[in-house]
């Protein structure tokens, strides 16, 4: 039953475009693989809607006759269109499931990346804080009672300190 034609009968391009735009707005733009799955879901939903319209039309026709008076051909048509509808529903559900799974994987990956980024930032803050505390301890070790402790002269015995450096 699956027609390869995008538009058949009285179907309108505007209706298809509206459906496609809604799906693309929700799921599109996240990479070629996801975009491909979005396009598949769009087609599958379009085919499902077509099959549902045809099924509804058939039921409308069959409703004109009491079911006990249906011919074998009428029963056959109902069974056939029920299978078509079921196949289209399953195909759409499968495509949508694949799309959602890939999207969920992307969300999980982004969340994991963000968590790692936050852990690294936290660790960096800890390292900076510890380095600042170490520097303060070293600075306070060089001071006693607010007076700077004289650093010993690093000149060698017998050398005169240089003057006028700079």
Image (cartoon, grey):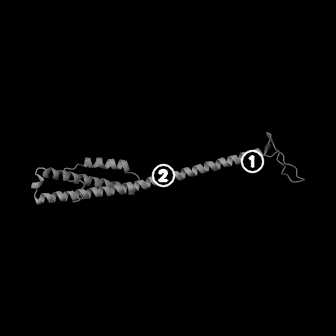
Q: For the view shown, which residue lies furthest in the front direction?
A: 68
Residue at x 78%, y 45% (from the top left corner): 142
Tell which circle, 1 or 2, labels the residue nearer the N-terminal end: 2
Q: For the view shown, which residue lies furthest in the right direction?
A: 158
Q: Secondary structure at mark 2?
A: helix
Q: Nearer the viewer, residue 106 or 13?
A: 106
**Residue 89 visible here:** yes
Cα–Cα span, label 1 and label 2: 40 Å
Q: Are marks 1 and 2 in contact (CB under 8 Å)?
A: no
Q: Is residue 146 above or below residue 121?
A: above
Residue at x 67%, y 48% (from the top left corner): 130
Q: Nearer the viewer, residue 8 or 56?
A: 56
Place of residue 55 in the rendered image (x, y in percent of width and height, measured from the top left): 19, 53
Task: Name the disc covering residue 31, or none.
Answer: none
Q: Picture quarter containing residue 74?
A: bottom left
Q: Which residue is mark 2?
A: 111
Residue at x 13%, y 50% (from the top left corner): 63
**Residue 31 visible here:** no
Residue at x 19%, y 59% (from the top left corner): 80
Q: Nearer the viewer, residue 113 or 14?
A: 113
Residue 166 shown left or right of residue 21 in the figure: right
Q: Nearer the viewer, residue 80 or 35?
A: 80
Place of residue 56 in the rendered image (x, y in percent of width and height, measured from the top left): 19, 51
Q: Secondary structure at mark 1?
A: helix
Q: Residues within 10 Å of mark 1 (few under 14, many from 20)?
A: few
Place of residue 30 in the rendered image (x, y in percent of width and height, measured from the top left): 41, 52
Q: Which residue is mark 1?
A: 138
Place of residue 33 in the rendered image (x, y in percent of width and height, measured from the top left): 39, 57
Split into 4 quadrants, where in the image is the N terminus?
bottom left
Residue 20 shown left or right of residue 102 in the figure: left
Q: Residues within 10 Å of mark 2 (few under 14, many from 20)?
A: few
Residue 141 shown left or right of residue 91 in the figure: right
């Amino acid at each position: 039953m699956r027609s390869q034609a995008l538009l058949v009968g009285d179907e309108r391009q505007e209706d298809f475009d509206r459906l496609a735009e809604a799906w693309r707005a929700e799921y599109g733009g996240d990479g070629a693989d996801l975009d491909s799955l979005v396009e598949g879901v769009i087609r599958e939903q379009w085919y499902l809607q077509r099959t549902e319209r045809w099924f509804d039309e058939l039921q409308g026709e069959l409703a004109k006759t009491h079911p006990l008076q249906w011919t074998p051909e009428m029963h056959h048509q109902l069974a056939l269109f029920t299978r078509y509808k079921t196949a289209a529903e399953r195909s759409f559900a499968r495509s949508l499931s694949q799309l959602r799974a890939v999207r969920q994987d992307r969300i999980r990956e982004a969340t994991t990346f963000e968590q790692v980024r936050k852990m690294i930032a936290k660790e960096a803050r800890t390292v900076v804080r510890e380095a600042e505390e170490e520097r303060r301890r070293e600075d306070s070790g060089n001071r006693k009672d607010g007076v700077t402790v004289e650093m010993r002269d690093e000149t060698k015995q017998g050398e005169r300190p240089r003057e006028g450096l700079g």
